[in-house]
Image (tube, rainbow, N blue to C red):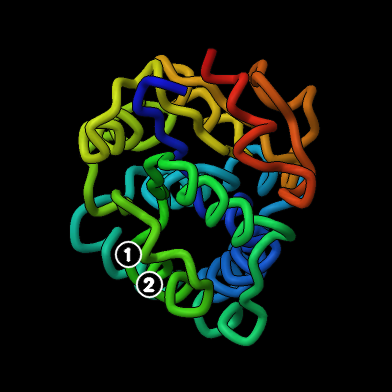
């Protein structure tokens, strides 16, 4: 490829299978606040959503400001404690990222999770050095499906949005990337094809992916 291109990864459900542990952390958190969401509610209102949305939805009122910060710290602290012994990358992603970097692709991570979660995972999975842009929830004013985090990532990487390929696993995340004018690979870790907006490609993991196999998506 002659043009500069970028690949941007979401984190939860894309770099690691964190969603079951987020569910467990939220269940523990909500139980402590006398709430018991159903599995269906979790699937519809948790995966790929910001904490402000999730907490406001389940408490059935706006949660913001200092109260949001306090609740978020409580829940995310539970998540990190529960998940730390189980951190493992989705199969093939470390080799895939190395292959992309070796072929001159610019790389970034754009997550709705807070920096502390990102730091936990990047501390255990050896991909940080290849990343030219790392953005978390603290870096944006508008969360997915708003395209802000992906447009900011493209700007950080110096690549036009139309030359970016995003790996996402949630409806709001895929929507955010499409809203940014980017191509998307749907990672089927949390949802089926039918539950996501149309993507250029769908994968279960990264074991069969390489720079050569995705390069035609940039044409």
Frontmost residue, 205 versus 83: 205
Residue at the image position 37 percent from the left and 72 percent from the top:
119
Frontmost residue, 206 versus 109: 206
Residues packed near mark 2 inside 10 Å, few (<14), some (14 to 19) or many (20 plus): few
Q: Quadrant of residue 200?
A: top right
* 69 shown above or below 163: below
Residue at the image position 35 percent from the left and 37 percent from the top:
143
The CA distance from mark 1 to mark 2 is 6 Å
Q: Which mark is residue 18?
A: none
Q: Which residue is mark 2?
A: 119
Residue at the image position 49 percent from the left and 72 percent from the top:
126
Residues packed near mark 1 inside 10 Å, few (<14), some (14 to 19) or many (20 plus): some
Q: x and y percent of residue 46 in the render?
A: 58, 47
Residue at the image position 54 percent from the left and 53 percent from the top:
97
Q: Determine whether, in the image, residue 195 is placed left or right of residue 3.
A: right
Q: x and y percent of residue 70 in the render?
A: 29, 70
Q: Quadrant of residue 213?
A: top right
Q: Determine whether, in the image, residue 7 is placed left or right of residue 47.
A: left
SS type, badge 1: helix
Residues marked 1 and 2 touching at CB (< 8 Å) = yes
Q: x and y percent of residue 154 in the render?
A: 29, 32
Q: x and y percent of residue 83 in the render?
A: 60, 78
* 209 shown above or below 16: above
Frontmost residue, 47 versus 89: 89
Q: Which residue is mark 1?
A: 115
SS type, badge 2: helix
* 142 shown above or below 17: above
- Figure quadrant of the C terminus: top right
């Amino acid at each position: 490829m002659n043009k500069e291109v970028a690949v941007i990864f979401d984190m939860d459900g894309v770099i690691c299978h964190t969603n079951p542990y987020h569910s467990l952390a939220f269940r523990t958190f909500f139980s402590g606040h006398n709430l018991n969401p159903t599995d269906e509610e979790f699937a519809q209102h948790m995966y790929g959503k910001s904490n402000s949305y999730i907490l406001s939805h389940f408490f059935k009122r706006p949660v913001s400001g200092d109260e949001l910060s306090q609740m978020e710290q409580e829940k995310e602290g539970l998540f990190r404690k529960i998940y730390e012994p189980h951190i493992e990358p989705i199969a093939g992603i470390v080799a895939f990222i190395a292959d992309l970097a070796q072929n001159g692709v610019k790389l970034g991570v754009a997550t709705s999770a807070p920096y502390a979660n990102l730091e936990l995972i990047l501390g255990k999975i050896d991909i940080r050095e290849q990343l030219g842009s790392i953005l978390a929830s603290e870096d944006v004013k508008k969360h997915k499906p708003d395209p802000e985090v992906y447009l900011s990532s493209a700007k950080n990487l110096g690549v036009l949005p139309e030359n970016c390929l995003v790996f996402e696993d949630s409806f709001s995340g895929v929507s955010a990337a499409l809203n940014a004018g980017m191509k998307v690979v749907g990672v089927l870790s949390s949802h089926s094809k039918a539950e996501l907006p149309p993507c250029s490609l769908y994968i279960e993991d990264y074991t069969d992916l390489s720079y050569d196999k995705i390069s035609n998506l940039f044409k």
